[in-house]
Amino acid sequence: MRTLGEAVRVLVGVLAGTPVGEFVDARGLARLVVLVAGAEGASEALVQVAEVVGVVGVLDAGAQRAVRIRLRHRAARGALG
């Protein structure tokens, strides 16, 4: 990951249409990863995000719904940002 724009594009693509996509600020996460971790660390962090999203993506519909509900409750309490 060489630029913030590239990191944003990757994160938006990875998160689009996933159960967690609506809860993640792709631009903010990309900025954090690129600025704090550096290019090599950013790549690894994005791979880890993709892995988590991939795991959630293969859950059945009921489990995905449970993840969304849990994240919405945490977001409502301010626990997600």
Image (tube, grey):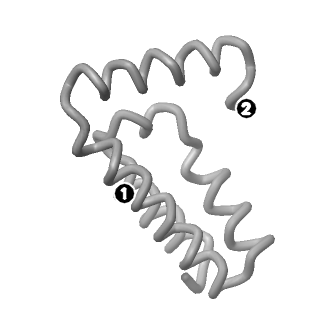
Question: Helix, strand, or loop for circle 1?
Answer: helix
Residue pointed to by mark 2: 81
Q: Residue at x 53, y 24 (%)?
A: 71
Question: Helix, strand, or loop for circle 2?
Answer: loop
Local packing at callout 1 (Cα closer than 10 Å; few below 14, some 14-19, many 20+) is: some
Question: If you read the primary sequence from the N terminus, does the residue marked by circle 1 or circle 2 appear first?
Answer: 1
Quadrant of the drawing holding the C terminus: top right
Vertical placement of residue 19 versus 77, above or below: below
Q: Residue at x 38, y 19 (%)?
A: 66
The answer to whether residue 78 is left or right of residue 75 is right
Q: Nearer the viewer, residue 13 or 65?
A: 65
Vertical placement of residue 57 versus 6, above or below: above
Task: Find residue 61 and report its horizontal and vertical position in percent.
Answer: 20, 25
Report if the CB atoms under discs 1 and 2 are less than 8 Å apart: no
Local packing at callout 2 (Cα closer than 10 Å; few below 14, some 14-19, many 20+) is: few
The Cα–Cα distance between marks 1 and 2, rounded to whole angstroms, is 20 Å
Task: Find residue 42 and report its horizontal and vertical position in percent.
Answer: 62, 75
Which amino acid type is shown beneath numbered disc 1?
Val
Q: Residue at x 55, y 50 (%)?
A: 26
Quadrant of the drawing holding the N terminus: bottom right
Residue pointed to by mark 1: 14
The answer to whether residue 53 is left or right of residue 77 is left
The answer to whether residue 76 is left or right of residue 44 is right
Question: How many numbered discs?
Answer: 2
Q: Quadrant of residue 79?
A: top right
Vertical placement of residue 73 versus 34, above or below: above
Q: Quadrant of residue 69?
A: top left
